Image: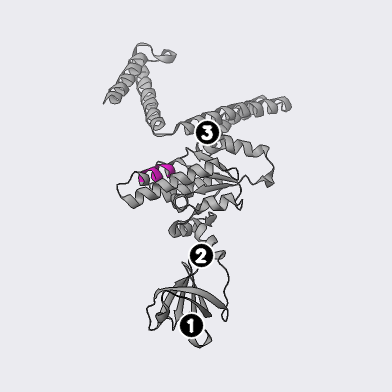
């Protein structure tokens, strides 16, 4: 309410100033009309500025000032090589108008160019791996990103968006005990990554208030920073790939690193439980791969040697099918 009254005061004050002190010796009513129009424009700009982030305002101001300087420089250069006075004046006015406009647009759309990490990359060699890897909440909570970074298999800079931190904090403060534990583990993962000497990390304040969900914000940030998204979320993976965003899926990496097992090979497994079909037993390898073994239900709780019959690749990983030959034991 107070800001509304203040805006009315500004409009009334500027309108009265135009009435009592009309510019360019105009009629008092015309001066008041000009003052009213200018005050409404100022109030409108004020409402737009209040909805914008400070870094967008700062970058658009820098872009506009840079456009003014560049426009003045281009106009001055043309003036030194041209003799036509009217053409020179037109060109100078053109540059002084168009260049600040372009600078303003670039400043509002590419505000991350003023981030220190982005500026520093111009002083580094291109092969130093200054590529951005943007972490989502699922990859942080998963925790395996720390092992990948500690083994130096991932380079560049890990980017943690502020909106991901907020989501992680909400999970850590959840009344649900399991969610709270997962959120706190995610915070511990971030602490480990920031202290790691194998990878560089940065927290970016860039946000997109007009975008609702976190996944869409991650995609927009990846577009702006020309980076890759690191995730374990299957849906985010597919949506990002449809929009041309490179994705590093930790689950896909884990599946790719599982040992290759061929039909006919022998495996030693521990039968943990019974399977769905008659005489089936179920075992698991060290990497979590499920092994379904025929003729092994009676061997539950024992280590046995089986012969691999087939390997099935699914969307969630590999499944190995084998047979227990009691006569061969």
In the displayed orientation, state which residue is furthest to the right: 81
Residue 165 colored in magenta in the image:
yes
Lateral position of residue 60 relative to residue 49, left or right: right
Q: Regarding mark 3 in the picture, which secondary structure is present there? A: helix
Decide which of tag 1 and tag 2 comes sooner along the chain.
2
Asked if marks 1 and 3 touch (Cβ < 8 Å), the reply is no
Asked if marks 1 and 2 touch (Cβ < 8 Å), the reply is no
Q: Position of residue 279 (x, y in %)?
A: 40, 83
Segment tinted magenta in the rendering: 164-170
Residue 3 shows in the view = yes
Q: Nearer the viewer, residue 96 or 103?
A: 103
List the residue tagged with mark 1. Answer: 324
Q: Nearer the viewer, residue 71 or 52?
A: 52
Decide which of tag 2 and tag 3 comes sooner along the chain.
3
Q: Quadrant of the N terminus?
A: top left
Q: Specify the quadrant of the image occupied by residue 71.
A: top right
Lateral position of residue 31 relative to residue 93, left or right: left
Q: Residue at x 42, y 74 (%)?
A: 301
List the residue tagged with mark 3. Answer: 104
Q: Regarding mark 1 in the picture, which secondary structure is present there? A: loop
């Amino acid at each position: 309410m107070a800001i509304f009254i203040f805006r009315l005061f500004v409009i009334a004050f500027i309108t009265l100033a135009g009435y009592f002190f009309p510019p360019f010796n105009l009629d008092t009513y015309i001066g008041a009309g000009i003052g009213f129009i200018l005050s409404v424009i100022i109030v409108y700009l004020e409402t737009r500025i209040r909805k914008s982030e400070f870094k967008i305002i700062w970058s658009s101001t820098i872009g506009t000032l840079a456009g003014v300087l560049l426009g003045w420089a281009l106009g001055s250069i043309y003036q030194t090589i041209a003799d036509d006075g009217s053409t020179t004046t037109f060109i100078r006015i053109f540059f002084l108008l168009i260049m600040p406009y372009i600078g303003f647009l670039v400043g509002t759309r590419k505000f991350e160019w003023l981030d220190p990490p982005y500026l520093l990359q111009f002083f580094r060699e291109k092969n130093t791996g200054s590529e951005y890897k943007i972490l989502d909440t699922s990859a942080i909570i998963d925790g395996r990103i720390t092992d990948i970074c500690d083994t130096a298999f991932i380079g560049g800079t890990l980017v943690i968006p502020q909106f991901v931190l907020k989501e992680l904090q909400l999970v850590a403060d959840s009344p649900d005990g399991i969610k709270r534990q997962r959120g706190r583990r995610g915070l511990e993962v971030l602490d480990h990554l920031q202290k790691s000497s194998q990878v560089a990390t940065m927290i970016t304040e860039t946000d997109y208030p007009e975008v609702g969900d976190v996944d869409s914000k991650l995609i927009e940030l990846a577009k702006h920073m020309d980076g890759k998204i690191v995730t374990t979320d299957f849906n985010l993976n597919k949506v990002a790939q449809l929009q041309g965003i490179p994705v590093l899926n930790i689950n896909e990496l884990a599946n790719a690193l599982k040992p290759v097992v061929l039909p006919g090979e022998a495996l030693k497994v521990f039968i943990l439980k019974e399977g769905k079909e008659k005489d089936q037993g179920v075992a698991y390898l060290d990497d979590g791969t499920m092994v379904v073994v025929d003729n092994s239900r009676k061997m539950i709780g024992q280590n046995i040697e089986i012969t691999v019959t087939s390997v099935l690749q699914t969307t969630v990983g590999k499944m190995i099918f084998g047979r227990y030959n009691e006569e061969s034991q």
